[in-house]
Image: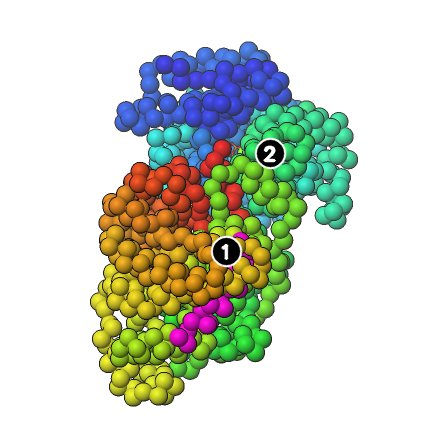
Amino acid sequence: TKWVYTFGDGSAEGRAGDKSLLGGKGANLAEMCNLGLPVPPGFTITTEACNWYYANGKTYPDDLREQVEAALGHIARITGRRFGDPERLLLVSVRSGARASMPGMMDTVLNLGLNDVTVEALARDSGDERFAYDSYRRFIQMYSNVVLGLDHEMFEEILEEEKARMGYELDTEFSAGDWRVVVDSYKARIEEELPDGFPQQPEEQLWGAIGAVFSSWMNARAITYRRLHDIPESWGTAVNVQAMVFGNMGDTSATGVAFTRNPSTGEKALYGEFLVNAQGEDVVAGIRTPQNITERARIDAGSDKPSLQKLMPQVFSDFVGICERLEKHYRDMQDVEFTIERGKLWMLQTRSGKRTARAALKIAVDMANEELISQEEAVARIDPASLDQLLHPTIDPKAKRDVIGVGLPASPGAATGEIVFTSEEAEDARQSGRKVILVRVETSPEDIHGMHAAEGILTTRGGMTSHAAVVARGMGKPCVSGAGSLRVDYRSETLIAAGRTLKKGDIITIDGGNGQVLAGAVDMLQPELSGDFAAIMEWADKARRMKVRANAETPADARMARSFGAEGIGLCRTEHMFFEGDRIIAMREMILAADEKGRRAALAKLLPMQRSDFVELFEIMAGLPVTIRLLDPPLHEFLPKTEKEFEEVAHVLGVPAETLRHRSEALHEFNPMLGHRGCRLAVSYPEIAEMQARAIFEAAVQAGRDTGKPVVPEVMVPLVGLKTELDFVKARIDEVARNVMEETGETIEYLTGTMIELPRAAVRAHVIAESAEFFSFGTNDLTQTTFGISRDDAAMFLETYRKKGMLEQDPFVSIDVDGVGELVRMATEKGRTTRPAIKLGICGEHGGDPASIRFCEEVGLDYVSCSPFRVPIARLAAAQAAV
Ligand code: ADP
Ligand code: MG
Ligand code: MG
């Protein structure tokens, strides 16, 4: 088997496409050689050798040694130097390199091959004894730490002691003799720990380092990192062995890192830093303050240290040329590492550079305009989830943060406001024009109006899928959940942090991007849909097949959805409308009514309010489709909870508190999620559905007249399991429609359909489709009912499942393709057999999740519907799924 691939001197055995075999670093080193760029020669031991190593009890394949020796011979032919030969000294670096860049792997070992004899040779060769001993002590330190597993601190201590003894401040003050002393102390100290002392044989050093790279694949940090980033263990890591070049050979030598474009703004300008007379990672490690590469960056930074452009103009212009070539070749912004040895430039690494969401947009659009990439590629390059950063206000990175606690980053964006502890206070405050943060131990469905009124939500209990987190994400409101170090005391109306107590009315800021809770107000940056953002969206719209709608019921949300490009409403949750203001009173009257007549009387009060809601929504959506779901939650949710509230409500309704309590007890259910809700309500109380249908149709007529654009409402019946349920409700809807048409003299076009959110509905979809003109997959409930878990309680054990590797992802965040997805697929196929033109969509949180959107495209749904803030994300994800 071929385990070793060489590179150097204008050619290589591998290329950029060989990342799975050679790792990212090795494949790109090979590619740079093939391009004829100056790269120190070397070789890559494949990831397959790593896998072999683990499959065979941590041993090497027989033929590996001879291949490594041959490859060292290859370096010797190019450099005229031989590994281990003091006459013509060759030193190497040993660098790990997995397919995906992975912190947690072994650090690089530089200057490998030095020992007590070769260090003298290096001094002689370079004519610089100080450099030679500096390199040797660096090597001992690095090797002892990453290969021998000795504590880094041990060496730092010795260095500090010597420094103090000699009265120096900086490492640069050390003379050759001083470094010799340090080297001796290092070696003596190592002998105390390891009887064999520091290995002197270059051969032994090399295999020690190779073994350490392979072993690091299974160290705890690497395993954790892989788990968090879904990197399979089977990938293995490659090892790169490369001839050393020296950035620490005096003032004409240097080392640096650069991005071919600005990684935070995306601006097309080389951006990077370097250090004169330094080696390897001195730049990143912050040992000295690095210098700017370009003159412009130096001026911008107000630095008085000369730029590379000024200091070494020839090297600079070579470097600029290489960066341009690399960018053209890879057709992407590159992150490069380089070293200058006595005025000669060497390239040591290139890879696609990490960038902020803003920079990603600018770079993609610029590159498309430069015709480096196509518009479709530009669209494909943006991570849809990263757009979230740009769609909310964020804390100015320059602002000072007074952190009083940290929770989970449950919903992105930052918000500032006065502390309030109840939803009622939140609402009152908003009405008087004040901004508030709703602070609760946890939230429940009754807090919806308070959450709407608040700028942001903070809870001290609950996870990423808690009620607060889910609802806040849906609303696009910043939320920090489960901030356990903070305590809410409702009685004294205080928020208690370590050593501090805040009162109701005090100002706090929450950062939903990182979970921080800050005291006071902080400067914010407002979301800006810049020209680049708009351009990418436009190109995405050309590429996608599925439509994107929004889940919205308030006029504000509907307007926001449209401004973000929503093509209709996929889910209007009518119950949210009943919580607002006086409506809850009429709703409660209806619930308390003794008979149908009483209910009809209360519903008559709700009708005009509901109708005006729909008129407004239809007008905002101006002819775009609007799907309205009939009342869904159990009635119990509309009743008060606490004794105090019972008294108050009883007073307002003019009934004895006892009556209210009785009704509440009668409505109580052990499993409300599986209880008297959805179309079951319409079966028990058809008059509710009739009122809603009337409101919808009357509003459609009015909005049609007002805007001159016909409205085609889509009436959606929730939680259907039986066709008979749908037929029962549909008969009522159709009758109301006929009546409204007769009364108004207008024809109303409308569709009646159902949510598919029970496994039975999916299984019987071909039958249900006889009556349903559309299906909307309610994947939140479908996930609950398919798994048999409740979202409100699942967070605690789902996390355990994930930790134990039993479940890869939270099925409420990304659709469970194998189970829930299979039901969606089945229902789609069955529905289409009965009704080929049936309209199919998805609503619920999955509609805004890129992976789930990909699945929807595969299954061939007509649209996805998500919260207004996620509409741009969904537009992009739908485009990426389509190409
Ligand atoms: P990482 O993956 O952590 O960036 P690298 O293998 O790229 O680790 O190496 C760390 C540092 O050592 C980089 O700054 C790199 O440029 C430098 N380096 C690696 N190999 C050599 C070499 N052969 N000659 C000089 N410097 C090197
Ligand atoms: Mg590197
Ligand atoms: Mg549902």
The residue carrying pointer 2 sits among few (fewer than 14), some (14 to 19) or many (20 or more) residues within 10 Å by Cα, namely many
* Residue nearer the viewer, 440 or 426: 426
Between 90 and 358, the residue placed more toward the observer is 358
Numbered badge on residue 464: none
Camera-nearest residue between 562 and 347: 562
Q: Residues within 10 Å of mark 1 (few under 14, many from 20)?
A: many
Q: x and y percent of residue 239 in the render?
A: 44, 26
Circle nearer the N terminus (2, 1): 2
Q: Which residue is mark 1?
A: 711
Quarter of the rendered image showing ligand 1: top right
Residue 665 in the image: state x and y as whole percent.
23, 77
Q: Which residue is mark 2?
A: 375
Residue at 61%, 46% in the rendered image: 533
Q: Secondary structure at mark 2?
A: helix
Tag nearer the camera, 2 or 1: 1
- Residue 232 at x, y percent in the picture: 36, 34
Rendered residue at 30%/64% (across/down): 682
Q: In the picture provided, is 845 more to the left or to the right than 379?
A: left
Magenta residue span? 604-623
Q: Residue at x 74, y 43 (%)?
A: 298
In the image, is 225 to the left or to the right of 91? left
Residue type, numbered disc 1 = Val
Disc 2 within 8 angstroms of ligand 2 (CB): no
| Residue drawn at point x = 35 percent, y = 61 percent | 735
Q: Main secondary structure of the magenta part?
A: helix
Q: In the rendered view, tell whether residue 686 sits above or below residue 366.
A: below
